[in-house]
Structures are given as structure tokens and as C-alpha cells.
Amino acid sequence: MSMTISEKILARHADRAEVQPEELIEVRVDFALGNDITAPLAIEAFRRTGVARVFDRDRIALVPDHFTPNKDINSAMQVKLMREFASEFQITHYFEVGRMGVEHALLPEQGLVLPGDVVIGADSHTCTYGALGAFATGVGSTDLAAAMITGRIWFKVPPSIKFIYRGKLRRWVGGKDLILHTIGQIGVDGARYRAMEFTGEVIEGLPMADRFTMSNMAIEAGAKVGVIAPDALTEAYVRDRARRSYEFFESDPGAVYERVYDWDVSGFEPMVALPHSPENVRPVHELPEIQIHQAVIGSCTNGRLEDLRLAAGILKGRKVARNVRCLVIPATQRIYQEAMREGLLEIFVDAEAAVSTPTCGPCLGGHMGILAPGERAVATTNRNFVGRMGHPESEVYLSNPAVAAASAIAGRIVHPDAV
């Protein structure tokens, strides 16, 4: 039987020759993770069982990244609970301030999630690791607790949808624009409990940073996973990082897809998602004049070194508009260091932007960039729901890093060529 990449990975982890869409199966988990919002709930559920050990202390990561550095007493208590659990159960991969990063940038960087893996995380953007050719998906905190005990989880095998991207990308257009276009076309529920498979010559030419961006936002279309078949670029990324062995899978030529989308992206422009939905997408040149008060460059979607380089290239020698707060948040400590060595942080500070230690911070309205009523932000983050970054009467516009940087300079949302 011909299978998709997602079906092959699930079949291998269920110790079966094949699986079919809609089947309920139980699979082995290669890696499990939780953060400072979700892990405390999983830890409470774990403790209620009375078990004395985790299934494998080397295959669990606990990453306090959402409200860190701790913004208040409650967040400090959440992290303390995680820290104590990690110590008690000798969890190998516990990352806190000074060592941590935004989880979905940190774990691939550390070589902890790998091609061919089944990865679960108590965070919806766990689907990011599909960019490596893994079956990676978000789960609830009680599911995480069960997996930390047993090393197993059940899934309904998702049907797959294939997305083919052809042509040649224009300047300033990248993975963020491709996924925003895709969500704009199919809607926020257009891939509900489906495996989105990104393919085509454009995907083959995308750097890993852009691939991570695309897989990261698969959940914004309702998908279970957003997967890209691993190739030579993937191998170059994981070869020196991997903490254990890995395996490449690819879809069979005769694999069955529920739907297939085929786009020539040669004419695409930078895209912007308007409030209050990631599907409310328009090319930047079609927007009316939209004044902004804040620009956020970072997050698990676009906080990688390549994103910072793109933003710095626009901000160099310029100043952020006086009525705009520009926040730059490297996604990990390593990215922070590399950006410092390359002089990117100096460019941001000279432009009068604020540079933060790694944190999710403003992305979820956590801290370090909360919006007041009536304020607007352009952000490289992944969601722009009502109240996502602060007050319910604020607005968030999603874009790539080049648009965000250019808009910070102009004081309004603009094409990068406009500054």
C-alpha cells in the first residue's frame, strides 16, 4: 500500500506495516515537551498517578518560555514547580533563563527533535518540527502527563492534503508569506485534523528557517501536522546537532491525498494578515494606510537568525518612528549570541529598538509588549485573535520580518521597498 510521509512515520511507530486515514492507533513517542503554561498542569496530573519515574528522562524537555523572565508571582510559582519536578525526576533537558529559548526554536537547534520522530508537546505550535520531516503535534496537558509516564500516545491517523508551490519567489517573499497565503486560501479550519504536506520546487529551495515558519503555522489552518519531506538541506541542519539516530521518510508516488493545491507563487508579494484572524490575508500593497504603535520581530515563527538578519538589513542606518515601539526578540540564547557577533544587535539598538532576552513575551499577551486599547501592532508572530497581544480593543497584523522592520521605520504598515 502506498502511504504519505505522515502515514509512514505513524506506521513505523505503531510497529505496523501500514496505517490508513481515520484509524485509531497507539504509537511510541520519541520526544515530549511542555512549557510554563502547560507543563504545571501535566505535572499535577502526573503526580496524581503516584508513579515513581518518567518513561525516559532524556526524551522530555521542560522549557519555561512564555512568561519568562518571570513577570509576576504566579509565573514564578509555575516555573518553580517545573524546576523542582525536573530536579526530582532528573529530567535532562530543562532550560531556564540564560540557557533557554522559545521552545520551538530551541529544540531543533539543540538536536532534540529529529527527522522521522513522533513528537508531542503541550503547545499547539509543536507542529513546527514537521519542517524536519517529523510527525509533530500539540496535545493537551493530561496527554503529556500520560506520555511522560508511558512513552506512548494514541492518534487518529489524519488524512493528508498536499500543497505544491511552483515558480520563483520575489525579493522580500518567504515562508511566512507562503503560509499566510495558504491559510488565506483554505481558511483557519481548512485543514482541520489533517496533515498538511508542503512540496514543490519552491519548498525545496527554502532555507530551514522558512520551512520552520511554514510548519509552525500549520495549526493556524487547523492542521494536526505541517510536514516537509527531509532532503540534503535537512541533513545539513541536523547532522552535527542530532543527539541520537534519525530516519528520513518520504511519501510514495502513489500516496492518496484528500485534496491537492497547486500554486505558481512567482507573482506573490509580502502578505499581511489583518485582525482578527490569520485567514484575513491581503498583499501589503492592497492595504490602506494603517498607522502602528508597535512592531514585534521574534517568536517561534520568525525569531531565528535569518529573520533578524532580514530585519537588520532594513533597519541599518535608520531610526524607528518616534511613535512606534520596536521590539526585537532573538528566539534562543545561541541566536542572541550569533546576532551579537554579527553586529545585528548594535544595528537594532542604534535604530532605537529594544532587544530582549529570549521569551514568548508579547506573542500571547504575556508581557514585555502589551497593547493598550486602540493600539495596533505589526508582528512576526503567528496569531492575531482579539486580545491576543493585550487589550481586546487592540489590533495585531501578522507579517514577515522585512515588512515589520519597514513598518517600524515608516510608522505604518508598508512594503519593504517603501523605506
Image (cartoon, rainbow, N blue to C red):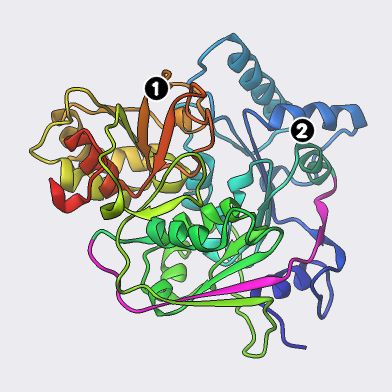
**Numbered tag placed on residue 259 in the rendering:** none
Q: Residue at x 79, y 59 (%)?
A: 28
Task: Read off the residue under disc 2.
Answer: 42
Residue 243 shows up from this direction:
no
Q: Residue at x 12, y 45 (%)?
A: 419
Q: Position of residue 389 (x, y in %)?
A: 47, 28
Q: Position of residue 108 (x, y in %)?
A: 51, 52
Figure check: 175 above or below 410: below
Q: Position of residue 344 (x, y in %)?
A: 20, 40
Residue 107 shows up from this direction:
yes
Label 2 – label 1 distance at C-alpha: 37 Å
The amino acid type, in three-letter code, at marker 2 is Ala
Q: Where on the picture, by quarter, is residue 369? A: top left
Task: Read off the residue under disc 1.
Answer: 374
Q: Residue at x 57, y 67 (%)?
A: 133
Q: Position of residue 352 (x, y in %)?
A: 18, 26
Q: Secondary structure at mark 1?
A: loop
- Which stretch is magenta? 150-171
Magenta stretch: includes residue 209: no
In primary-sequence order, the first of circles 2 and 1 is 2
User: Within 10 Å of the Cα at label 2, are there few (<14), some (14-19), or many (20+) other Cα atoms?
Assistant: many
Figure check: 60 above or below 388: below
